[in-house]
Image: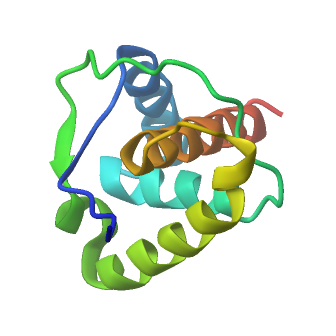
Amino acid sequence: MLQTIDTIKLSEKQKQQLMRLKTKTGIENWNVLCRWALCMSLAEDSTPPVEDIPSDSNVEMSWRVFAGEYADVYLAVLRDVFQKQSAYIDGVHFSDFVKLHLNRGISYLINLSSG
């Protein structure tokens, strides 16, 4: 089955973290910060920790808005990494896998910005 992503909806915690990053960096768009966060997490060889990440904020964007003009490239990379890491995170669906990487990446950006 081919994995796809329709929308990305952030948790309230992620929203608050990204608001702090927007203030510190001057970067206005959620999707830009989220793309950087996703790439930072995907650059790691390890799998992100499995946790339940609620979609409880009012920040939601379509996959095309999230990934921009390179949406197909991001999706291909995610599919490849999912295939490689799925054995280590048994039972995690593709959409949750994306949320885990995004969550870890946002944490990385927060840690970088507070240093």
Which residue is drawn at the image coordinates 63% and 39% (left, top)?
90
Which residue is drawn at the image coordinates 27% and 64% (left, top)?
4
Q: Which of 84 and 56 is in front in this view?
A: 84
Residue 39 on image: x %, y % = 60, 63
Residue 91 horizontal side relative to residue 31, left or right: right
**Labels in figure, total:** 0
Q: Which of 70 and 76 is in front in this view?
A: 76
Residue 19 on image: x %, y % = 40, 29
Q: In this view, does 61 lie above or below 2?
A: above
In which quarter of the view is residue 5 placed? bottom left
Residue 76 horizontal side relative to residue 54, left or right: right
Q: Is residue 95 above or below residue 113?
A: below
Q: Is residue 26 visible in this depiction of the protein?
A: no
Q: In this view, does 39 lie above or below 71?
A: above
Residue 85 on image: x %, y % = 69, 57
Q: Is residue 25 above or below residue 39?
A: above
Q: Nearer the viewer, residue 10 or 17?
A: 10
